[in-house]
Amino acid sequence: QKEVEQNSGPLSVPEGAIASLNCTYSDRGSQSFFWYRQYSGKSPELIMFIYSNGDKEDGRFTAQLNKASQYVSLLIRDSQPSDSATYLCAVYGSQGNLIFGKGTKLSVKP
Amino acid sequence: DTEVTQTPKHLVMGMTNKKSLKCEQHMGHRAMYWYKQKAKKPPELMFVYSYEKLSINESVPSRFSPECPNSSLLNLHLHALQPEDSALYLCASSQGSHSKDYGNTIYFGEGSWLTVV
Protein backbone atom coordinates (compact mmCIF):
# COMPACT_ATOMS: atom_id res chain seq x y z
CA GLN A 1 0.00 0.00 0.00
CA LYS A 2 1.49 3.28 -1.13
CA GLU A 3 1.61 5.92 1.56
CA VAL A 4 2.29 9.02 -0.54
CA GLU A 5 0.68 9.57 -3.92
CA GLN A 6 1.56 12.17 -6.51
CA ASN A 7 0.55 12.65 -10.10
CA SER A 8 3.71 11.87 -12.05
CA GLY A 9 2.87 14.41 -14.74
CA PRO A 10 4.42 15.90 -16.67
CA LEU A 11 2.64 19.08 -15.65
CA SER A 12 3.17 21.79 -18.22
CA VAL A 13 2.42 25.44 -17.46
CA PRO A 14 3.27 28.65 -19.33
CA GLU A 15 5.78 31.07 -17.88
CA GLY A 16 4.14 33.41 -15.38
CA ALA A 17 1.29 31.03 -14.54
CA ILE A 18 0.57 29.32 -11.23
CA ALA A 19 1.74 25.71 -11.01
CA SER A 20 -0.23 23.52 -8.62
CA LEU A 21 1.34 20.30 -7.38
CA ASN A 22 -0.68 17.87 -5.29
CA CYS A 23 0.04 15.05 -2.90
CA THR A 24 -2.11 12.72 -0.81
CA TYR A 25 -0.98 10.52 2.04
CA SER A 26 -2.50 7.57 3.84
CA ASP A 27 -1.19 7.78 7.41
CA ARG A 28 -3.53 9.98 9.46
CA GLY A 29 -0.88 10.22 12.17
CA SER A 30 1.56 12.02 9.88
CA GLN A 31 2.68 15.34 11.30
CA SER A 32 5.47 16.63 9.06
CA PHE A 33 5.25 17.28 5.34
CA PHE A 34 8.00 18.34 2.97
CA TRP A 35 8.42 19.44 -0.61
CA TYR A 36 11.73 18.84 -2.37
CA ARG A 37 12.76 20.02 -5.81
CA GLN A 38 15.07 17.83 -7.88
CA TYR A 39 16.65 19.00 -11.08
CA SER A 40 17.68 16.31 -13.55
CA GLY A 41 20.96 14.76 -12.47
CA LYS A 42 21.00 16.59 -9.12
CA SER A 43 20.07 15.75 -5.57
CA PRO A 44 16.78 16.73 -3.88
CA GLU A 45 16.70 20.26 -2.49
CA LEU A 46 14.31 21.24 0.30
CA ILE A 47 11.76 23.82 -0.84
CA MET A 48 9.33 23.95 2.07
CA PHE A 49 8.03 22.08 5.07
CA ILE A 50 4.66 22.44 6.74
CA TYR A 51 3.27 21.05 9.99
CA SER A 52 0.01 22.90 10.59
CA ASN A 53 -3.25 22.99 8.68
CA GLY A 54 -3.54 25.95 6.35
CA ASP A 55 -1.13 27.80 4.14
CA LYS A 56 2.54 28.59 4.51
CA GLU A 57 4.13 31.06 2.14
CA ASP A 58 7.78 31.55 1.21
CA GLY A 59 8.39 33.88 -1.68
CA ARG A 60 6.71 32.47 -4.79
CA PHE A 61 5.99 29.17 -3.05
CA THR A 62 2.94 28.34 -0.94
CA ALA A 63 2.43 25.01 0.77
CA GLN A 64 -1.11 24.05 1.76
CA LEU A 65 -2.00 21.32 4.24
CA ASN A 66 -5.40 19.80 4.94
CA LYS A 67 -5.02 17.00 7.46
CA ALA A 68 -8.72 16.11 7.41
CA SER A 69 -8.48 15.38 3.69
CA GLN A 70 -4.90 14.04 4.01
CA TYR A 71 -3.82 16.37 1.29
CA VAL A 72 -0.81 18.63 0.85
CA SER A 73 -0.10 20.86 -2.10
CA LEU A 74 2.55 23.22 -3.40
CA LEU A 75 1.67 26.31 -5.41
CA ILE A 76 4.34 28.09 -7.43
CA ARG A 77 3.32 31.60 -8.46
CA ASP A 78 4.81 33.40 -11.46
CA SER A 79 6.36 30.15 -12.68
CA GLN A 80 9.72 30.48 -14.38
CA PRO A 81 11.51 28.10 -16.76
CA SER A 82 14.07 27.61 -13.97
CA ASP A 83 11.28 26.00 -11.90
CA SER A 84 11.21 23.10 -14.37
CA ALA A 85 12.14 20.09 -12.26
CA THR A 86 10.66 17.10 -10.48
CA TYR A 87 8.92 17.97 -7.21
CA LEU A 88 8.93 15.32 -4.52
CA CYS A 89 6.38 15.26 -1.72
CA ALA A 90 7.64 13.58 1.45
CA VAL A 91 5.78 12.59 4.60
CA TYR A 92 6.93 10.92 7.77
CA GLY A 93 5.21 7.55 7.94
CA SER A 94 4.05 5.58 10.94
CA GLN A 95 7.39 3.77 11.18
CA GLY A 96 9.25 7.06 11.47
CA ASN A 97 10.66 6.87 7.96
CA LEU A 98 10.42 9.75 5.53
CA ILE A 99 8.27 8.40 2.69
CA PHE A 100 8.64 10.00 -0.72
CA GLY A 101 6.04 10.19 -3.42
CA LYS A 102 7.16 9.31 -6.92
CA GLY A 103 7.41 12.98 -7.82
CA THR A 104 5.69 15.27 -10.30
CA LYS A 105 7.66 16.52 -13.26
CA LEU A 106 6.96 20.19 -13.89
CA SER A 107 7.75 21.89 -17.19
CA VAL A 108 7.45 25.67 -17.45
CA LYS A 109 7.29 26.79 -21.07
CA PRO A 110 8.71 30.24 -22.00
CA ASP B 1 24.67 25.31 -1.20
CA THR B 2 24.26 22.03 0.61
CA GLU B 3 26.18 21.62 3.86
CA VAL B 4 26.31 17.88 3.41
CA THR B 5 29.42 17.02 1.40
CA GLN B 6 29.80 13.77 -0.48
CA THR B 7 32.83 12.29 -2.19
CA PRO B 8 33.48 11.15 -4.79
CA LYS B 9 30.89 12.73 -7.06
CA HIS B 10 31.36 9.97 -9.62
CA LEU B 11 32.67 6.44 -9.14
CA VAL B 12 33.08 3.62 -11.64
CA MET B 13 33.95 0.27 -10.16
CA GLY B 14 34.20 -3.33 -11.25
CA MET B 15 32.18 -6.08 -9.65
CA THR B 16 35.24 -7.38 -7.77
CA ASN B 17 36.37 -3.99 -6.49
CA LYS B 18 36.13 -2.58 -2.98
CA LYS B 19 35.41 1.12 -2.75
CA SER B 20 33.87 3.59 -0.31
CA LEU B 21 31.55 6.57 -0.50
CA LYS B 22 32.13 9.31 2.05
CA CYS B 23 29.86 11.91 3.58
CA GLU B 24 30.50 14.77 5.97
CA GLN B 25 28.29 17.34 7.66
CA HIS B 26 29.17 20.13 10.05
CA MET B 27 25.68 21.26 11.03
CA GLY B 28 25.73 19.42 14.35
CA HIS B 29 23.08 17.03 13.09
CA ARG B 30 22.71 13.80 15.04
CA ALA B 31 21.04 11.64 12.41
CA MET B 32 22.64 10.65 9.11
CA TYR B 33 21.21 8.66 6.26
CA TRP B 34 22.09 6.78 3.09
CA TYR B 35 19.54 6.75 0.29
CA LYS B 36 19.71 5.10 -3.12
CA GLN B 37 17.99 6.65 -6.12
CA LYS B 38 17.49 5.06 -9.51
CA ALA B 39 16.49 7.05 -12.58
CA LYS B 40 12.93 8.43 -12.50
CA LYS B 41 12.35 6.94 -9.03
CA PRO B 42 12.17 8.60 -5.60
CA PRO B 43 14.99 8.14 -3.10
CA GLU B 44 14.90 4.82 -1.23
CA LEU B 45 16.11 4.68 2.34
CA MET B 46 19.01 2.29 2.97
CA PHE B 47 20.42 3.08 6.42
CA VAL B 48 19.89 5.49 9.27
CA TYR B 49 22.42 6.35 11.96
CA SER B 50 21.10 8.10 15.02
CA TYR B 51 23.64 9.41 17.53
CA GLU B 52 26.33 7.37 15.73
CA LYS B 53 24.44 4.10 16.12
CA LEU B 54 22.83 2.20 13.29
CA SER B 55 19.10 2.48 13.93
CA ILE B 56 17.59 1.39 10.62
CA ASN B 57 18.80 -1.05 7.97
CA GLU B 58 16.17 -1.40 5.29
CA SER B 59 17.13 -5.00 4.46
CA VAL B 60 20.05 -3.82 2.38
CA PRO B 61 22.33 -6.56 0.94
CA SER B 62 25.55 -7.11 2.86
CA ARG B 63 27.62 -5.95 -0.09
CA PHE B 64 26.75 -2.47 1.22
CA SER B 65 28.32 -1.80 4.61
CA PRO B 66 27.74 1.51 6.41
CA GLU B 67 30.05 3.02 8.98
CA CYS B 68 29.71 6.09 11.16
CA PRO B 69 33.17 6.96 12.59
CA ASN B 70 31.82 10.04 14.40
CA SER B 71 28.82 12.33 14.43
CA SER B 72 30.03 14.26 11.38
CA LEU B 73 31.11 11.42 9.13
CA LEU B 74 29.29 8.63 7.37
CA ASN B 75 30.80 6.08 5.02
CA LEU B 76 29.31 3.46 2.75
CA HIS B 77 31.68 0.61 1.95
CA LEU B 78 31.02 -1.19 -1.30
CA HIS B 79 32.15 -4.70 -2.18
CA ALA B 80 31.17 -7.19 -4.88
CA LEU B 81 28.47 -4.96 -6.28
CA GLN B 82 26.27 -5.84 -9.22
CA PRO B 83 25.51 -3.72 -12.28
CA GLU B 84 21.97 -3.18 -10.96
CA ASP B 85 23.49 -1.36 -7.99
CA SER B 86 24.40 1.49 -10.33
CA ALA B 87 22.52 4.52 -9.04
CA LEU B 88 22.79 7.89 -7.34
CA TYR B 89 23.72 7.41 -3.69
CA LEU B 90 22.54 10.22 -1.47
CA CYS B 91 23.79 11.05 1.98
CA ALA B 92 21.53 13.16 4.18
CA SER B 93 21.39 14.47 7.70
CA SER B 94 18.83 15.86 10.13
CA GLN B 95 19.02 17.67 13.44
CA GLY B 96 17.36 15.22 15.75
CA SER B 97 17.16 11.51 16.02
CA HIS B 98 15.19 9.80 13.31
CA SER B 99 11.63 10.67 14.07
CA LYS B 100 8.39 11.71 12.49
CA ASP B 101 8.04 14.52 14.98
CA TYR B 102 8.20 18.17 14.21
CA GLY B 103 11.42 19.76 13.15
CA ASN B 104 13.20 16.77 11.71
CA THR B 105 13.99 18.16 8.31
CA ILE B 106 16.30 16.04 6.18
CA TYR B 107 18.96 17.77 4.09
CA PHE B 108 20.65 15.97 1.21
CA GLY B 109 24.17 16.10 -0.12
CA GLU B 110 24.84 16.39 -3.83
CA GLY B 111 25.11 12.65 -4.21
CA SER B 112 27.62 10.18 -5.58
CA TRP B 113 26.93 8.68 -8.98
CA LEU B 114 27.96 5.03 -8.92
CA THR B 115 28.42 2.91 -12.02
CA VAL B 116 29.20 -0.78 -11.62
CA VAL B 117 30.72 -2.42 -14.67
Image (spheres, rainbow, N blue to C red):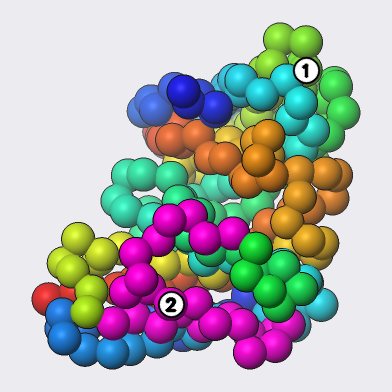
The three-letter code of the residue at mark 1 reads Lys
Residue A5 in the image: state x and y as whole percent. 50, 24
Element carrying mark 1: loop
Measuring from the top left, give residue A70's x and y in whole percent.
69, 16
Residue A67 is tagged as 1
Secondary structure of residue under mark 2: strand
Q: Residue at x 22, y 79 (%)?
A: B80
Task: Identify the image quadrant of residue A93.
Answer: top right
Q: Viewer-proximal residue, A19 or A81?
A: A19
Which residue in the rendered view is the most extreme toward the top? A69
Count neighbours of disc 2 (C-alpha within 10 A) and say few if under 14, some if 14 to 19, many if 20 or more. Answer: some
**B5 vs A98: above or below:** below
Tell me what residue is drawn at x 78 percent, y 61 percent.
Answer: B97
Give the chain letter at badge 1: A
Residue B63's x, y, as percent? 32, 74
Question: In this view of the protein, which residue sits in the foreground, A5 or A54?
Answer: A5
Is residue B75 rendered magenta in the image? yes
Q: Residue A75: where, in percent of width, then height? A: 65, 27
Q: Is residue A43 visible?
A: no
The dominant secondary structure in magenta is: strand
Image quadrant containing the C terminus of chain A = top left
The chain letter under disc 2 is B
Q: Is residue A58 magenta?
A: no
Q: Is residue A59 above or below residue B4?
A: above
Residue behind mark 2: B65
Residue B62 as seen in the image, left or right of residue B51: left
Q: Which residues are magenta?
A: B56-79
Amino acid under label 2?
Answer: Ser
Q: Quadrant of residue B52?
A: bottom right
Q: Which residue sits at x=73%, y=63%? A: B94
Vertical placement of A69 versus A7: above or below? above
Q: Residue furthest left?
A: B117
